[in-house]
Amino acid sequence: MTATAPGPADGVPGSKAAARIRRAACEVFAAKGYGLATTREIAASLGMSPGAVYPHYKTKESLLFAIATEGHRAVLDALLAADDPARSPTERLRAAIASFVRWHAENRAIARVIQYELRALTDDHFELIAGLRRATTRVFTEIAEAGAASGEFSFGDVSTVTLALTSLGIDVSRWFPVRNHADADDLADDYAEIALRIVGARAAR
Amino acid sequence: MTATAPGPADGVPGSKAAARIRRAACEVFAAKGYGLATTREIAASLGMSPGAVYPHYKTKESLLFAIATEGHRAVLDALLAADDPARSPTERLRAAIASFVRWHAENRAIARVIQYELRALTDDHFELIAGLRRATTRVFTEIAEAGAASGEFSFGDVSTVTLALTSLGIDVSRWFPVRNHADADDLADDYAEIALRIVGARAAR
């Protein structure tokens, strides 16, 4: 999978109207769940007529797939933009986790949809999304392996630490914000330190 | 909040039939989401007539509340059973996280419902559930603080590490099992080591 910009050929219609519908759908899906949401209600939330969604998305599932594609690409893009392979693994992990956590905090409507509402996707669509998820995981795996190779990090199994690192960020979309933790930047910084501990970074602690 | 056994007065009907309905409802809620599930469908999955749920649960919401109460108590009970305050904070955290992770892996249908399907609860019911959640969080907070006080642990802010520790366990219910991580006991052991790193335990690494 690659992290290229979304286009109509990939199931993410490029028009402004289609993008507005995706944003409105995210809010409705996040608030009441994909299952109960109707395209009629999504159109109504934009002051559009009941049938206004269909020229852009033939089915509710194609709308979910477009959101899932756009959201997973946005996470991957945020991660790749933050990760500079020329830097030390410690600095790379700090930047990557901060970006990953910040994205899940700042985009929690779409984050909740793409993390918790994917069971309705068709098998083919799910497979495409799984490819994007693997690409995201791979960024963390590569950084962890680079740190192990250079001796900066010390941990057991790379797939276990990768899982823990991604869980830390993904779960943010479930609870953020809460009273003591409502600033995305502060959380990103704090979780970056925790991530360094998870991989046993020499500079941590 | 306390961790006493569930009883009818607390919204968790004690009869065997009511318990069977809760188990069936968990499967349906976890598979398609609370919103789309119907009590008719839950009854049908047990070979019961469409109205069979109502003598036990007047509304679908009261069924969700009973599941949420039962589930959150079960997590808290598992945690309290694993935590022996007479042991060292390191041993306490290892046991508590292992138990918490194992519970979310082994009970993932109810875990998914109680972690991701609570938005439909009434405000009053949500407040009761929030109390049980705070009691769970408090177990981790107390262990972390005991470790900081004894000098075994070294970390920044206790609420941040508590959040990270609980996230690690809760997110298991979203993804478990996957190909490389399908054994609940192995995962519990691995995550216990990661938890010790998160709090900066001296014995870790």
Image (cartoon, coloured by chain):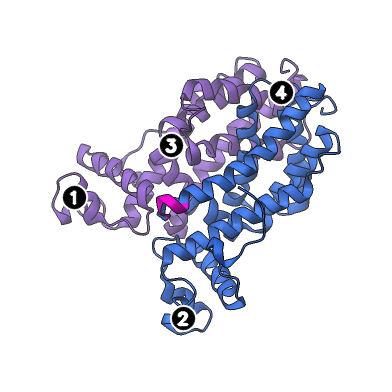
Chain colours: A blue, B purple
Query: What secondary structure is found at the residue carrying circle 2?
Result: helix
Which residue is denoted by mark 2 in the rendering? A52
- Amino acid under label 3? Arg
Which residue is denoted by mark 1 in the rendering? B44
Do badges 3 and 4 share one subunit?
yes
Front position among marks 2 and 1: 2
Which portion, as a residue range, is magenta?
Answer: A121-125
Label 3, label 4: how many angstroms apart (C-alpha)?
25 Å
Q: Is residue A73 left or right of residue B7?
A: right
- Picture quadrant where residue B121 is located: bottom left
- Amino acid under label 2? Ala
Which residue is at a point 47% across and 57% down the rendered structure image? B119
Q: Is residue A55 left or right of residue B134?
A: left
Instruction: Tally the numbered discs.
Output: 4
Front position among marks 1 and 4: 1
Q: Mark 2 and 1 residues: CB-CB less than 8 Å, in contact?
A: no
Q: Pointer 2 indicates a residue of which chain? A: A
Label 4, label 2: how many angstroms apart (C-alpha)?
58 Å
Image disc number at residue B73: 3
| Residue in the foreground of this view, choosing between B2 and A157 | A157
Which residue is denoted by mark 4 in the rendering? B147
Label 2, label 1: how many angstroms apart (C-alpha)?
37 Å
Q: Is residue A151 left or right of residue B66?
A: right
On the question of residue B1 being in view, the answer is no
